[in-house]
Image (cartoon, grey):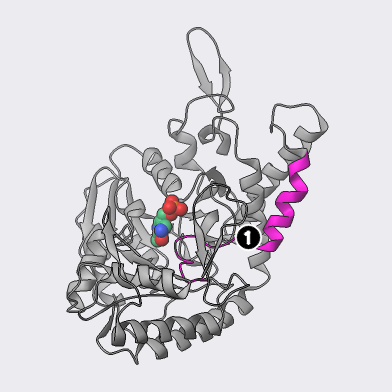
Amino acid sequence: QSVAVPGVVGSGLRVPLVTGGTANYANLDHAASAPCLSAVRDAVDELLPYYASVHRGAGFASQVCTRVYEGARQVLLDFAGARQGDEVVFTRNTTDALNLLASAVPRGTSVVVFDTVHHAALLPWRNVRRIPAPETPADAVAALDAALGECPEGPRLAVLTGACNVTGELWPVAELARVARRRGARTVLDAAQLAPHRPIRLAELDVDYAALSGHKLYAPFGAGALIGRADWLNAADPYLAGGGATRAVNERAVSWTTGPERHEAGSPNTVGVHALATACRTFATRWEGVVEHESSLLSRLRAGLAEIPGLRELSLFGTGHDRVGVVSFTIDGQDPGLIAAALSAEHAIGVRDGLFCAHLGTKNLLARAGADAERALRVSIGLGTTAEHVDRLVAALKSLVAEGPATTYRQVDGRWEP
Ligand code: PMP
């Protein structure tokens, strides 16, 4: 059974239903993007009537939007546990924030990054040295220490990941930041996967920058942030050249402003930033509940997965390592793409399959796990996940492994379709 997607006229898409009547779709792909919090939707609704240009408008609506937009910077600083003097540049997402930092590091900066990380953290840098996948947290710390020790004199930056987007495992950020500091390096934390699950704590961990995305934090797409030290950002060329980033322009010269506006030329995404800040504010008071909810569902999920014959869980630091609600795996003899398609079409469960924009890392983990597939399945839980979703997934996997899909599927453009 299926129903047309509400409000998406003419899309031809239909939501698969397990039982008629209610849209009981189980979204187990929170690591990609998380659905909007109702507090975020309400905040956006409230702002929409005052939708107007920020900064330069003199009218009331412009003043409202300017206040909302500028006020959001402090919300993000608080959310990230930032230091006095840190600043927030609003970006489109984590990818944009890390590319902005890559464009702003002083000339000749040596960058060190683990090759297992998400492409957004792996690819933006010049002068980059890649560290092979570590096997334990202690290996990671020692490898970073050694790699930084081999960098030439001059500015250095270590790129860290908070939580792995493939396995959900938490990286030892505090220890990595400590060795980086000892080696005279700054650190940037890719907090895309960490931010929806655990506090970031920039000052406490002595990390210099963090990058995050609103759409993984239960706000809509289109707003993210780079948070951290102002000096490199103020000394760099503007990330975008245009209106809002300038102090003065004449026929011969341009002088650029300092502060976050230097990198935010063009009309900003005020509604998206308001949504992001609302999500951050909502999370800030609820950490205990978030961690408790997700930990209990994660245990239930992993206990269920452990009962599936031939299932191999991917892991960087060992399956006992602390992690957020993300699990990737293969099942011997099964095509992950076909399983993902059948979960969607026959069980109304959304998961992801592939290499998760971390090709080097995922391939390495597949090899380590002795998997017979070239891609993996990823299940990621979040605030809307229920025990019923988890149980339905486990039951569906068991039945797909034992009996195969109920209908036939064919490959269209590399994807399986019923
Ligand atoms: N880093 C990590 C760890 C991620 O999981 C993601 C998103 N999958 C990104 C960076 C990139 O985020 P965005 O697509 O929002 O730029």
Using the rendered view, name the quadrant where residue 304 is placed: bottom left
Image: 267 above or below 358: above
- Residue 188 visible within the image: no
Residue drawn at 33 percent across, 56 percent down: 158
- Residue 236 lies, in percent from the top left, at 43, 34
Mark 1 Cα-neighbour bin, 10 Å: few <14, some 14–19, many ≥20: many
| Residue 42 lies within the magenta run | yes
Q: Is residue 174 left or right of residue 261?
A: left
Task: Looking at this view, name the residue that lies furthest to the right.
Answer: 60
Quadrant location, the C terminus? bottom left
- Residue 275 lies, in percent from the top left, at 65, 52
For the residue pair 186 and 299, the one nearer the viewer reads as: 299
Does the Cβ of the disc 1 residue fall within 8 Å of ligand 1?
Answer: no
Q: Disc 1 designates what residue?
A: 280
Ligand 1: give its quadrant: bottom left
Residue drawn at 56 percent across, 29 percent down: 266
Using the rendered view, name the quadrant where residue 100 is placed: top left
- Residue 153 lies, in percent from the top left, at 25, 47
Q: What is the three-letter code of the residue carrying label 1?
A: Cys
For the residue pair 145 and 305, the one nearer the viewer reads as: 305
| Residue 91 lies within the magenta run | no
- Residue 413 lies, in percent from the top left, at 27, 52
Residue span colored magenta: 26-49
Q: Is residue 364 left or right of residue 35?
A: left
Q: Is residue 107 left or right of residue 40?
A: left
For the residue pair 139 and 270, the one nearer the viewer reads as: 270
